[in-house]
Image (tube, coloured by chain):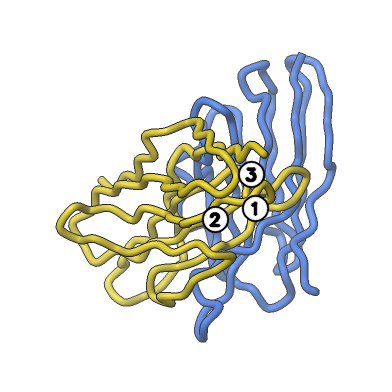
Chain colours: A yellow, B blue
């Protein structure tokens, strides 16, 4: 069965420090990975997806199939990055896309001034 | 800016009472999801629909939870009877198919349920 693991429930860093939020997955098929973010008092929203290979708000994430990981990184954290971050995995449903996502447990990132 | 609308935003009820949460997906989105968010479990998928047909509700306790989509503009999640362990934030999300937006979920603001 597919699974997404975010080993850190809480992560604290100081402003300007590098940050890495870990995500590991288990799935035998061809995965599509996402990072969603929930800022305080805001809706859960897409941050980035691996197929886009883009940097959003300074964050990047590389899919490492050998290590089955999709860690989220930012070289210099900002206070406004403080939020809940969820890693999510979409199953490869034989080419028919239903968009079903399995989420990890989430990591609360706090960036201190 | 298209949004997923959920009601109620907050609900406090007593154990044993029926709770109904409603969701209006984004117009044109044909896949609708119900997730439950707790600190311990994170985001758990309860059920989801495509073109109003239930595809998977294995994450939902069948004895007390039910999910329906009576039409393309309304999805409902009902708990009867409610229990204190159901206290959580319930999110509805929708997605379309095809194009760059496929597989990208748009979430509602959530319904925060407290069962006393």
Chain of the residue under label 3: A
Q: Which mark is residue A36?
A: 2
Q: Where is residue A81 drawn, in percent x and y? A: 62, 50
Q: Secondary structure at mark 2?
A: strand
Task: Determine crowd level at label 3: few under 14, some 14-19, many 20+ residues with C-alpha closer than 10 A.
Answer: many
For label 1, the residue is: A44
Residue A65 in percent (x, y) is at 20, 61
Q: Which part of the image, by quadrant, shows the N terminus of chain B?
A: bottom right
Q: Which one is nearer the viewer's eye here, A5 or B26?
A: A5
Instruction: Name the mark on residue A82.
Output: 3
- Which secondary structure lies at badge 3? loop
Q: Distance from label 1 to label 3 (Cα)?
A: 14 Å
> Residue at the location (50% across, 66% down)?
A48
The foreground one among B53 and B87 is: B87
Q: Are marks 1 and 2 in contact (CB under 8 Å)?
A: yes
Of the numbered discs 2 and 3, the one sitting upstream in the chain is 2
């Amino acid at each position: 069965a597919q699974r997404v693991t975010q080993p850190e429930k809480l992560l604290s860093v100081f402003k300007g420090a590098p940050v890495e939020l870990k995500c590991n997955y288990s799935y035998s098929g061809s995965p599509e990975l996402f990072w969603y973010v929930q800022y305080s008092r805001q809706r859960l929203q897409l941050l980035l997806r691996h197929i886009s290979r883009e940097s959003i708000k300074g964050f990047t994430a590389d899919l490492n199939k050998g290590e089955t990981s999709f860690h989220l990184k930012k070289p210099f954290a900002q206070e406004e990055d403080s939020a809940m971050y969820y890693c999510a995995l979409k199953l490869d449903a034989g080419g028919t896309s239903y968009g079903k996502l399995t989420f990890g447990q989430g990591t609360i990132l706090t960036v201190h001034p | 800016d298209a949004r997923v609308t959920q009601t109620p935003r907050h609900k406090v009820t007593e154990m044993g009472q029926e709770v109904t949460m409603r969701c209006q997906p984004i117009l044109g989105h044909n896949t609708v999801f119900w997730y439950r968010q707790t600190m311990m479990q994170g985001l758990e998928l309860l059920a989801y629909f495509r073109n109003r047909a239930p595809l998977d509700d294995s994450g939902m306790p069948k004895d007390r939870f039910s999910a329906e989509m009576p039409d393309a503009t309304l999805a409902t999640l009902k708990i009867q009877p409610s229990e204190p362990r159901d206290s959580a934030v319930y999110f509805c999300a929708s997605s379309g198919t095809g194009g760059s937006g496929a597989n990208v979920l748009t979430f509602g603001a959530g319904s925060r349920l407290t069962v006393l």
